[in-house]
């Protein structure tokens, strides 16, 4: 049996930073140094990489060199101590805020192992990791509050709807249900006494009054 190198899985919402563990199992091999290339989705931004307990115990150094969009990881030491099985390292990744829900791959290529004498050891199987981008958690209601005289009464998690109650220019009670996705702005148009929902990036009419901005559900 040959050495295995396994990348763990993680999950987070857009904009989150997640930790991914890498586990080494030398099986019957005696590995004193190694290197590999870390490849990951363009929607992930690499952060710090922390050596695991098996590297600190063996007094090994972990170096990371960017090669284009790939990270080359080199593990070595000024000794002939073999690396045991266990947590090799933990890598941090930040999920792009614009990432849609779904899987983002993290993988390893070009693996090289050497024994204490510097002799190359044939690499064994590697297991890719998956960072799952989750959707921001919706909420079913929002607390009762009033902004510019408009009261937000209810939000439905499934349909992303909000019931807005207010007193119109004719002093009559009004109510309107609008669909408010996350990262959007609610405006009131005094000319028609109606509400409009716009994505943050879109242009809006300058005569509309800003009512509320929705981030991650409220």
Image (spheres, rainbow, N blue to C red):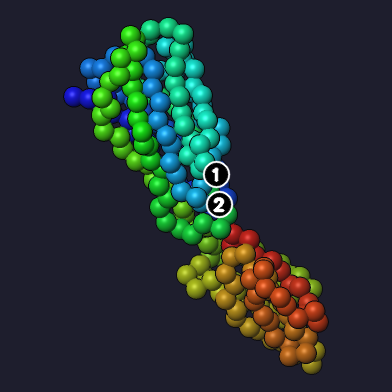
Residue 118 or residue 174, whichever sits in front: 118
Q: Quadrant of residue 141?
A: bottom right
* Furthest residue in direction left, as rendered: 1
In this view of the protein, can residue 162 be seen by the observer?
yes
Crowd band around label 2 with a 10 angstrom C-alpha radius: few (<14), some (14–19), many (20+): some
Image coordinates of residue 59 in percent, x first then y, are: 46, 11
**Where is the N terminus found, in terms of image quarters?**
top left
Label 2 element class: loop
Left or right, residue 72 beside residue 186? left
Q: Residue at x 65, y 75 (%)?
A: 198
Residue 79's place in the image compared with 180, above or below, is above
Q: What residue appears at the point 60 percent right and 80 percent down from the top-left corner? A: 177
Residue ID for mark 2: 96
For the point 49% across and 22% down, the residue is: 62
- Disc 1 crowd rating (10 Å Cα; few below 14, some 14-19, many 20+) is some
The residue tagged 1 is 45
Residue at figure coordinates x 42%, y 50% from the top left = 104
Residue 72 left/right relative to 166: left
Nearer-the-camera pick, 46 or 149: 46
Q: Is residue 218 visible?
A: no
Separation of marks 1 and 2 at Cα, in angstroms: 7 Å
Q: Secondary structure at mark 1?
A: strand
Specify whether 157 is left or right of 22.
right
Find out whether the residues at labels 1 and 2 contact each other: C-beta distance under 8 Å: yes
Q: Position of residue 21 (x, y in %)?
A: 42, 33
Question: What is the x, y in percent for residue 83?
Answer: 36, 15
Quadrant housing the C terminus:
bottom right
Quick one: label 1 or label 2, which is nearer the N terminus? 1
């Amino acid at each position: 049996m040959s050495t295995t190198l396994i990348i763990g899985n993680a999950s987070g919402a857009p904009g989150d930073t997640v930790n991914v563990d890498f586990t080494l199992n030398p099986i019957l091999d005696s590995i004193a140094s190694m290197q590999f290339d870390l490849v990951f989705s363009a929607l992930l931004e690499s952060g710090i990489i922390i050596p695991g307990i098996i590297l600190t115990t063996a007094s090994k150094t972990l170096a990371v060199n960017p090669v284009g969009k790939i990270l080359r990881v080199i593990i070595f030491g000024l000794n002939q101590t073999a690396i045991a099985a266990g947590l090799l390292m933990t890598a941090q990744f930040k999920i792009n805020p614009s990432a849609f829900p779904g899987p983002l791959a993290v993988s390893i290529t070009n693996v090289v192992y050497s024994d204490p004498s510097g002799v190359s050891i044939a690499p064994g199987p590697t297991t890719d990791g998956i960072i799952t981008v989750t959707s921001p958690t919706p909420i079913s209601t929002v607390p009762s509050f009033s902004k510019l005289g408009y009261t937000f009464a209810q939000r439905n998690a499934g349909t992303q709807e909000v019931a807005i109650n207010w007193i119109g220019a004719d002093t009559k009670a009004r109510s309107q249900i609008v669909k408010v996705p996350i990262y959007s702005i609610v405006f009131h148009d005094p000319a028609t006494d109606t509400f409009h929902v716009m994505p943050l990036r879109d242009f809006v009419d300058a005569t509309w009054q800003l009512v509320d901005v929705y981030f991650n559900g409220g």
